[in-house]
Amino acid sequence: MAKLKSLIKIEGTLDGMTFYKGKEGYLVRTKGGVSKNRIETDPAFIRTRENGQEFSQISKSGKLLRLVLTPLISDVKDDTLIARLVKVMGQVKNADSTSTRGNRQVGIGLETLEGKNMLKGFDFNANAGLNEILLTDYLLNTATGEINIPNFIPLQQLNTPSGATHVSILSAVININFITNEKTLQASAEINVPINNTSVAINATPPSMPNGTGQTVFLFKISFYQEINGLQYALNNGSFNVLQIIEII
């Protein structure tokens, strides 16, 4: 690696040399590494090819899950979401004990209890986990997707972010097949209540259960709002909102 001392500062590749800006200024290095053709054909790189095949598969699975949940995660995410999801999908893939190395799949792993437990409890916003925000128990009906909190007192049973005046609770269910890429989402209407000491019964139920040949995944969403002059606005662009996978069957 060498420093570029020319008056002309460039970035990119030229004549087999790569120019780039680093912490120590503009640097230059020659192109190196193993050729793509060797990686694809040399028996010595069979493990590399197997790992690459499986990484591609888990990346696609993570993308499929994000796509079906697009209406819910647009205001519930953090900068680490994709990396965290790829990591947990890799763990689910490892639960596939029937496929050969290089061909293990998230969809097969998720059919196992071990695989389900890997994904269950995943928070789409690492800065607002359900277990840290909701300070009371809830009931989930896996036949209907209903989330029930009989006597919910928001001011006492929420770890409420500063500035929030209202909270919404939503129940969602998806059926997702990571092998065929089929996906369906059903979500309840948001139940919006003021954050005070008044007890209210929460019954959030999707209009129907999603159809499909994959796994049924249940989710719990909490959103915070600030009311100003009679209108509610998402608090801090949803950075305190919660979305967690609470059950998989």
Image (tube, rainbow, N blue to C red):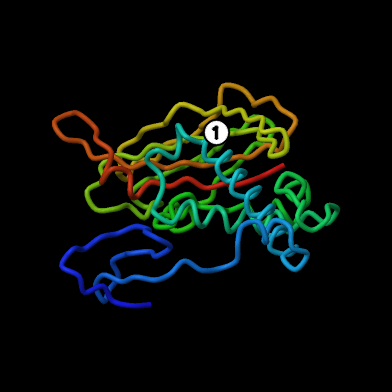
Q: Secondary structure at mark 1?
A: helix
Q: Quadrant of residue 4?
A: bottom left
Quarter of the image with the N terminus in it: bottom left
Q: Is residue 101 above or below residue 234?
A: below
- Side of 247 where 198 appears, left or right: left
Residue receiving disc 1:
68
Image location of residue 238, percent across then percent down: 32, 44
Image location of residue 246, percent across then percent down: 59, 47
Residue at image position (25%, 46%) is 236
Q: Quadrant of residue 249?
A: top right
Q: Decide which of 6, 175 is in the foreground and name it.
A: 6
Residue farthest right in this picture = 98
Q: Amino acid at mark 1?
A: Val
Image location of residue 48, percent across then percent down: 68, 63
- Side of 98 where 182 appears, left or right: left
Image location of residue 243, percent across then percent down: 47, 45
Q: Is residue 8 above or below residue 93?
A: below
